[in-house]
Image: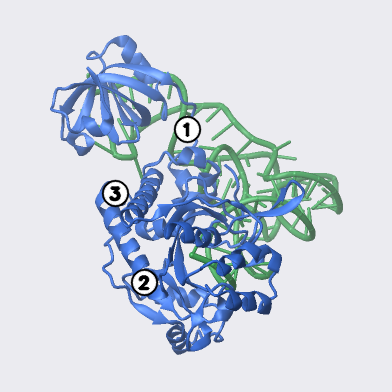
Amino acid sequence: MSQVEISEAFQLPEGSAVKLRGWVASKSEVGGIIFITLRDGTGYIQAAGKKGVIGEEDFQRLKRVTKETAVELEGSIRVDKRAPKGREVAIKSLSIIALADKWPITKSAVKSTSFLYDYRHLSIRGRKASAVIKIRWGIMKAAIEFFSQRGYCLISSPTIVQSACEGGATLFELDYFGQKAYLSQSAQFYEEAAICALGKVFILQPAFRAEKSKTPKHLTEFWMIEAEKAFMDQEENMKLQEDLITYICNRVVEDCKEELEVLGRRFKPPEPPFPRITYDEVLKFASEQNLGFKWGEDIPTVVETLLSKSQTKPFFITDYPLSARSFYHMTKPDNENITLSADLIAPEGHGEIATGGQRIHDYQTLLKRIESQELPMENFRWYLELRRYGMPPHSGFGVGVERLTKWVAGLKHIRAASLFPRTPTRVNP
RNA sequence: GCCGCCGUAGCUCAGCGUGGUAGAGCAGCUGGCUGUUAACCAGUUGGUCGUCGGUUCAAGUCCGACCGGCGGCGCCA
């Protein structure tokens, strides 16, 4: 009698004696026979206990078992086409490890988004919720592999900071022993400092945005994959993003086959190169659809969504106006109003998943930019100072992990990509 | 910040127009059934109708304010 995980139980020959531990995902009683579906994080397997075959005491215990009770059972593997996946465990004995109260998440509860997220600490036990979290892990794992293979160094930047990478209005403020401090929106500035020591770096850590954005693609706390490399121009930067996304998608399709199946997601990894569309071309496209906007403004969601739905693989929107970008962006050599930056947009209407660009490496240029945008110089002192000590041209990008998960897993809302999502209306559980 | 929708049993909802003291399905519980897969059959428990205030003999229902959630916009990964 060996202790095995459920995934292993499917590999063993018929008749093998096994001991399994897990939770009762479902139970049904049919007279003298009781079926439970056991879950242990590695899979699901049906176990059947028949009156007369197992002892009366064990049968009574099996009767008392409720949904989500933690149990340990002993039995033997048997093949039966009536069982899901054609296999089950014939129970010989069962013990209750931790009895569960009446389980609040019922079939009808699935209809209620707010209920499911109020009970997220419990509802994550569902097949779909677990599948999404495993896909998210698959994405992170693949990203780590990708950068590791290319010699990038993982760094960690502080999440408590004093200066903003993006707009100041979207920072979570906190009291740092009497001083104002903020939760970081991005690790970019710290990565820029780090490249002069390490050459090429990446991070995998949370970012915070105090945007009251109630949309299917916004979280207030989310994880980012960010990379920065010295001597890398914007062209190479886009190629790197292409390679990263392609690598991740291929790995996930390979590693998370079952999870994608549980979600009913037929996902085909994209083939590079990804199409590139300039901002001006987007503006022209929008005007043709009667959705025109002013040059220099950000691209409206309707336009981005429409474009995104017309594509079958991710694509870049390049050549953003400086007015729609943060101060640190480098502009084109022949046009100081257009930045060397690009957004990476996922297809099928999922929208933006990454932003990247070439940063200003010249001291005077950055100084003038900070002054012209009337930004608080003292906050950017060290960032600017980097440019006095051998800062080469460099570029980088940031990918939203949950946004990428949303696209790969085919989710309707980004909150499903987070174990305990933080949105403007939710900080609990 | 703006626009729209919704808060009634553990869950999903009906009841509100025409005010008279709460109802269904599911879940739970009890019993039956030796192959369930969203099991089935019979019985049954369960509610200060989001909160506060107002009108009224009487408010789940009418009026007002507030709170909470959901969908969308703007903004962004």
Same-chain status of marks 1 and 3: yes
Q: Position of residue A240 (x, y in %)?
A: 35, 66
On the image, numbered disc 1 is attached to which residue?
Answer: A103
Disc 2 residue type (three-letter):
Glu
Q: Are marks 3 and 2 in contact (CB under 8 Å)?
A: no
Disc 3 residue type (three-letter):
Cys
Q: Answer whether residue A122 is visible to the viewer in this image.
A: yes
- Colour given to chain A in the rendered image: blue
Q: How many marks?
A: 3
Same-chain status of marks 2 and 1: yes
Of label 2 and label 1, which has the lower sequence position? 1
Q: Position of residue B64 (x, y in %)?
A: 79, 60
For the residues carrying marks 3 and 2, which lies nearer the camera in this image? 2
Q: Which secondary structure, mark 1?
A: loop
On the image, numbered disc 2 is attached to which residue?
Answer: A236
Quarter of the picture containing the N terminus of chain A is top left
Q: Which secondary structure, mark 2?
A: helix
The residue nearer to you, when weighing A48 against B8, is A48
Of label 1 and label 3, which has the lower sequence position? 1
Quarter of the picture containing the C terminus of chain A is top right
* Cα separation between marks 2 and 1: 53 Å
Image position of A217 with respect to A59: above or below: below
> Residue at point 50% right, 42% down?
A120
| Residue A406 occupies quadrant | bottom left
Q: Position of residue A422 (x, y in %)?
A: 56, 51
On the image, numbered disc 3 is attached to which residue?
Answer: A256
Of label 3 and label 2, which has the lower sequence position? 2
The residue nearer to you, when weighing A224 against A97, is A224
Q: Residues within 10 Å of mark 3 (few under 14, many from 20)?
A: many
The residue nearer to you, when weighing A116 against B21, is A116
Q: Which chain does the green colour mark?
A: B
* Cα separation between marks 3 and 2: 30 Å
